[in-house]
Image (tube, grey):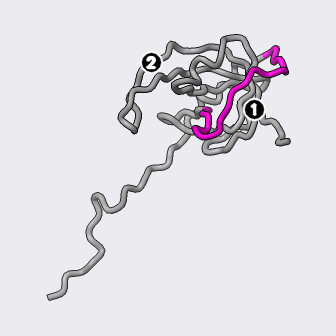
């Protein structure tokens, strides 16, 4: 079994095999259009443990799987960045949320990992704005 992480150990682009967190606050679900062109229900959920908090983004059917005040176990997730802010997200293919047997009593709300500004790498879309690398031959 993998060592369970604490929220303050999360880092951008890291894989999260398992973490237990308490649900602090659930935002009102909103509808957004995804890259697939379809409408999706999205909710930002503030979760945390004794070491800190982070925003977890839940999509579609996952939105209804959590309730404020309960402790949940998240398996197969990852840390992404959105507008320079770290977010915890479920892996689409095998991520899961279950109610945890372990109760988290005290959550450190003074250490919100999503408040830290994270530098995002610029994506390279190849060739735009660059001069051609070939030379004209006469």
Say which mark, if any, is on residue 30: 2
Q: Are marks 2 and 1 in contact (CB under 8 Å)?
A: no
Place of residue 5 in the rendered image (x, y in percent of width and height, measured from the top left): 78, 36
Q: Is residue 83 above or below residue 66?
A: below
Nearest the viewer among 63 and 19 is: 63
Say which mark, if any, is on residue 19: 1
The residue lying at 81 percent from left, 36 percent from top is 4
Q: Choose top left, top right, bottom left or bottom right for residue 62.
A: top right
Query: Image check: 75 left or right of 123?
Result: right
The residue lying at 71 percent from left, 11 percent from top is 69
Residue 103 lies within the magenta run: yes
Tell which residue pokes out farthest to the left in this image: 138
Place of residue 39 in the rendered image (x, y in percent of width and height, measured from the top left): 39, 26
The residue lying at 73 percent from left, 33 percent from top is 8
The secondary structure type at the circle numbered 2 is: strand
Q: Which residues are magenta?
A: 88-106
Q: Choose top left, top right, bottom left or bottom right for residue 50.
A: top right
The residue lying at 64 percent from left, 30 percent from top is 113
Q: Is residue 129 above or below residue 113?
A: below
Query: Image check: 61 left or right of 66?
Result: left
Q: Residues within 10 Å of mark 1 (few under 14, many from 20)?
A: many
Image quarter in which the C terminus is found:
bottom left
Between the C-alphas of marks 2 and 1, the distance is: 26 Å
Q: Is residue 42 above or below residue 118?
A: above
The main secondary structure of the magenta stretch is: loop
Circle nearer the N terminus (2, 1): 1
Say which mark, if any, is on residue 129: none
Tell which residue pokes out farthest to the bottom in this image: 138
Nearest the viewer among 67 and 50 is: 67
Place of residue 131 in the rendered image (x, y in percent of width and height, measured from the top left): 26, 67
Nearest the viewer among 10 and 4 is: 4
């Amino acid at each position: 079994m993998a060592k369970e992480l604490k929220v303050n150990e999360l880092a951008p682009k890291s894989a999260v095999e398992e973490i237990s967190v308490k649900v602090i606050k659930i935002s009102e679900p909103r509808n957004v259009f995804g890259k697939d062109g379809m409408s999706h229900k999205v909710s930002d959920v503030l979760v945390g443990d004794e070491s800190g908090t982070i925003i977890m983004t839940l999509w579609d059917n996952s939105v209804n799987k959590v309730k404020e005040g309960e402790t949940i176990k998240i398996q197969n997730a990852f840390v992404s960045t959105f507008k320079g802010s770290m977010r915890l997200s479920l892996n689409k293919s095998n991520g899961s949320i279950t109610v945890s047997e372990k109760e988290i009593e005290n959550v450190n709300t003074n250490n919100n990992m999503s408040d830290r500004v994270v530098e995002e790498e610029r994506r390279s879309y190849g060739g735009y704005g660059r001069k051609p690398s070939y030379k004209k031959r006469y």
